[in-house]
Amino acid sequence: MIDAAGLRVMRAIADEGSFTAAAASLGYTQPAISQMVRRLEQRTGTVLVERIGRNVRLTEAGLVLARHAGPVLAALDAAEEEVAAIAGLRSGRVRLMAFPSASATLVPRALSLVKQRFPDVSITFTEAEPPESLAALKAGECDLAIAFAYEGTDVARGEEDLDAFEITPLLDDEVRLAVPRQHAVAEQGTVHLGDLAADPWIAGCPRCRGHLVQLADAAGFRPDVAYETEDYVAVMGLVSEGLGVALIPDLILRTVHHSDVVALPMEPASRRTITAVTTPDLGRVPAVRATLDALIESASSQSTAPTTRLPEPTFSI
Amino acid sequence: MIDAAGLRVMRAIADEGSFTAAAASLGYTQPAISQMVRRLEQRTGTVLVERIGRNVRLTEAGLVLARHAGPVLAALDAAEEEVAAIAGLRSGRVRLMAFPSASATLVPRALSLVKQRFPDVSITFTEAEPPESLAALKAGECDLAIAFAYEGTDVARGEEDLDAFEITPLLDDEVRLAVPRQHAVAEQGTVHLGDLAADPWIAGCPRCRGHLVQLADAAGFRPDVAYETEDYVAVMGLVSEGLGVALIPDLILRTVHHSDVVALPMEPASRRTITAVTTPDLGRVPAVRATLDALIESASSQSTAPTTRLPEPTFSI
DNA sequence: CGGCGTCGATAACACCGGCTTATAGGATGA
DNA sequence: TCATCCTATAAGCCGGTGTTATCGACGCCG
């Protein structure tokens, strides 16, 4: 019945003291104000303005409306400003989820970039393996997920809604074979997976284990999984002690390094693709977009260094 | 840019969880909501709603708008209710001005009537003689004035804006001649003003004095004004002591009575009309209208008693 | 005292927001 | 796989809300 425009007009009349001045202050013409007041009067069923000769004065009811204009318009402006802040990246929150090995490498740099560019955008970060993070994304508990898919599979495999997700490739990650330094194959340039059919294996997360089994199957054997751990530091430790061999993505090796472990390229090579996943809607939210851009940048700067030679490890045992 | 309707819609979506339910709760159809959201989104330049499969979820910016809806809509409702209260006489303020002799008679009863009918309407009352009260009315410091005009003159005489005022006759008041009981004319049924040409006169307010001079002029003499006071109690005292004679409106005599004073009808008769004056706009303000009605009622109940015999005085010396 | 400037009211008109109905497309669940 | 429910879109209609043009009235000032 009464809207903000009406209140704005009443306030302008109260402030300016005439319809014409109110119209000027609001950027309207005088008849617009005249009609607006008449509409308000017939809607409220009350006289709002007293026409005294050639100027006007608000009645009690008119003053009531003018008085309410302040708070209402201020609140509307506040809402608008708050939304504008989100749109202008002067505010905003991104709930990011990434799997552990991404958390250690891609994420910190991206977070830093965002923080530097948009100090008021806050990113909350949770570690989660791809299946969980995609579920969280669907559940609305997450805005951006960093997932990975082994060559030939799809990130959202198992999920029917392929176009419910917006998938951005970040990094192409080679999977290597970690063996103890004293292992027979340690000196080879490349290793065939079949060469290690007899070795005990150390498997990581369920998906990684699935990948291992799949590769081994292609190589004609069933791996003897002696240990299972999602902690790559532990994997390296186990390998270094000669307790088994493991598949380790290159990305991990940039962070976790062990002097008694050798990471060899495999033949045939296996790769995984690290992707950022969001929804089409969320992908257009400025803060999410900015984070995604930072992740892309972070990934491209990481992939510029090919990893034949291992870079200086950031974490060493 | 953002209006109350938009906020209402966003809040409904937040509350109901779907466009369709929000539409139902607001009494709209579903496409109306769909379009409203789209408009809001392109106006704010931000994604407000995340379309997840077949239901929707608000983004951070959308939640911001939904969150602001409460205060804004509450304030609007408050404004509306406040105006409705004034329109419905559950509230309201009337600034009444009346000249002294009206204050003593018409006004108290009218105030009582209004108070009884509309307990929440507050009437502030100020004593003022007609020229002042009309000026206050013009100045916006008064909503309703009780004025009087002697026969043949106009309430708003001197004021050019005849139709700037809305004038309601309340009472027809006869002007009588107050003389001491022992005065020579005291036993006459009616008195000619000329019979008292030689007496000292007691005059009241400027306008009353003007009226006296005018009547005396018609009777062929210039009154010897020995005393001037606007206090009719004092007038009665002066008359009772034989210090002079005075014109006194009948209305006064209902309140102020003195056993040693006789109030005689004049020949020719002189009357004054007591009127309520407001502006056309203010006359449509419910509280003012109600007060005016009460005054009319109060006046008609007073005039039903013709004053040949004086009623029991409410104030006696 | 009469003209002129200014203010508000009104009429006529145009535009666009905003709602409706009708319909299509897509997701979910039995 | 079908039924159902949800959202998106198209097309149309109405009314609110703005404009310009004009009038009438008040008030100032020469």
Image (cartoon, coloured by chain):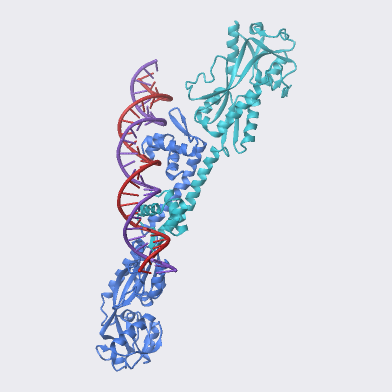
Chain colours: A blue, B cyan, C purple, D red
| Residue B75 position in % (x across, y down) | 50, 47
How many numbered marks have been drawn onto this rendered protein structure? 0
Residue at 28% over, 88% down: A219
Above or below — where is D5 with respect to A75?
below
Q: Is residue A276 visible?
A: yes
Image height of A42 relative to A295, above or below: above
Picture coordinates of residue A314 (x, y %)?
35, 79
- Residue nearest the viewer, comparing B182 with B249: B249
Residue A211: give x, y in percent of width and height: 33, 82
| B62 shown above or below B251 | below
Q: Quadrant of the C terminus of chain B?
A: top right
Q: Nearer the viewer, residue D2 or B230?
A: D2
Res A163 quadrant in image = bottom left
- In the rendered view, tell whether residue A78 sits above or below residue A210: above
- State left or right for residue B92 relative to residue B240: left
Q: Residue at x 53, y 33 (%)?
A: B285
Is B92 or C10 nearer to us in this picture? C10
- A97 sits to left or right of A312: right
* Visible residue check, residue B203: no
The structure residue drawn at horizontal position 57% and vertical position 11%, both measured from the top left corner, is B214
Q: Quadrant of residue D25?
A: top left
**Picture coordinates of residue B267, whole percent (x, y):** 64, 8
